[in-house]
Amino acid sequence: MQPDPSYTVPLLIDSKPITGPKTFPVHNPRTGEHIWNSTAASQADVSAAVASAAAAFPAWKKTTIPARRDLILKAAQLLEESGPEICDVMKLETAAEDSWCKLNLAKSVAMLKGVAGYITTIEGRLPPNDDPNVTSMILREPYGVVLAIAPWNAPIILCFRSVLYPLATGNTVVLKSSELSPRTHFLVTQIFHRAGFPAGTVNLIGHTREDAPEIATALISSPEVRKVNFTGSTAVGRKIAECAGRNLKPVMLELGGKAPVIVCEDADIEKAAKGAAFGAFHHAGQICMSSEKILVHKSISAPFTTALQAAAKAMYGSSQILIQAVGTKRVSELLSSAAAAGATLHPQPEKYQNPNEHHNVIVTNVTTSMDLWHTESFGPVVMVVEYEDEKEAIKMANDTEYGLSAGIWTTDLARGIRIAKEIESGAVHINGVTVYDEVAVPHGGVKNSGFGRFNAIWGLEEF
């Protein structure tokens, strides 16, 4: 896939590509090059997309489970065939490395195939009644039109996830794409269209950053929209939830994180260091599950930190590209504030010619009063902090408003499970990286990381 500034990414309404008069440019974060344009939806486009989904719902909800299963399996096949093209677009729009693109693709194919199997497990119930002459029947029914809002940072899998679970359970979907990865999201919706999903079951609305509040409010407020699922930052998630609350709409939120990792004194230092490096620096730390706070027993702090520095350098080099300069600015401000308060930065960041580029930085001598301790960096930064005993480690791990993912490294599995039960997090990975997700495991957060669960039967039951 080559850049083409003459091409405009369309909307998708009633299975028809729509290009409107208002467009905006899309740039490659790595080079700054204008790669193509994208259509910015109007209020009329929003109304048309919702109307299309509403019109398609009565027939779609009546489709049989085997029919939906076969369409989903067809989508999986098409995704495997179209994978290289979608990955090329993802690289151009988000500056993602090849490994992250391929992981997005593989996980998406696995999710499609997994959900095709899981939908056969959807069941109702016949509860016992007080009166033997009365029978109560409980059926699981779809909501109707679901608004799905997907982010740019894992634009293949998170887009598929936001659409697939409501669609598989008989809902129709309006997807609000990210202005940073519009073509990737368009290609995802095209997979459903090409697989044979009926017109109107999947619609796509794109917009400029400036129009985002107005478009989101119009979509959520629409009477035909019956539920919202959003994956993104906690700050935006609050606004989505507020709007949904005013309109009495149920909402599912998968938000930010500040994943802690506890490294016990009996841990395999090399494995823990490599796992922590992956969790902290993969995709430049622009993942909601990224490891941000590594808590290391003081007896192994020095060798672990040395091993972490070596692993980070070997796996990710000295620096990485973030999707926007606003990200590097946020990270630089957090680091400058921490350094001014006494933290040590390894290495001292330098300014690069590309404003989107930033050093991979390990921070030591951190205190809990620093902004870096509490704020999600969403960048290539990780803290290494010493602890004296298990109780202190658990307290520091839970000292955050977030609770999406966490990790523990120990050779004592019973100890790992015991600690895991004390961590306030949607998931805790023992001897595994915090950046981990698969179709069979429920995924979601606690505290300010959101509520609701994707994946497997939990993800289907949400819709």
Image (spheres, rainbow, N blue to C red):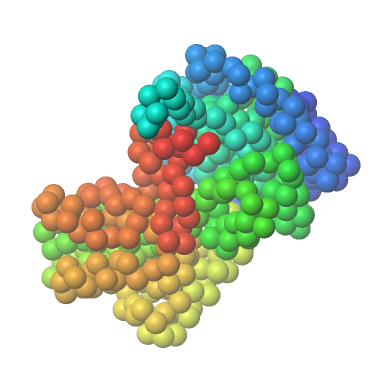
Q: Residue 309: x, y in percent?
A: 30, 62
Residue found at the far right of this picture = 21
Relative to 383, is 48 on the left or the right? right
Q: Residue 130: x, y in percent?
A: 37, 32
Relative to 360, is 45 on the left or the right? right
Q: How many marks?
A: 0
Compared with 60, 184 (above or below) is below
| Of 354 and 445, the residue lying toward us | 445
Compared with 433, 354 (above or below) is below
Relative to 364, is 173 on the left or the right? right
| Of 253 and 303, the residue lying toward us | 253
Whether residue 167 appears in this view of the structure is no
Whether residue 336 appears in this view of the structure is yes
Q: Residue 252: x, y in percent?
A: 53, 48
Q: Residue at x 80, y 40 (%)?
A: 47
Residue found at the far bottom of this picture = 341
Q: Residue at x 57, y 31 (%)?
A: 142
Q: Residue at x 61, y 64 (%)?
A: 326
Compared with 326, 206 (above or below) is above
Find residue 159 and report its image quarter.
top right
Q: Residue at x 29, y 52 (%)?
A: 428
Q: Residue 403: x, y in percent?
A: 39, 59
Quadrant into which the N terminus falls: top right
Compared with 388, 39 (above or below) is above
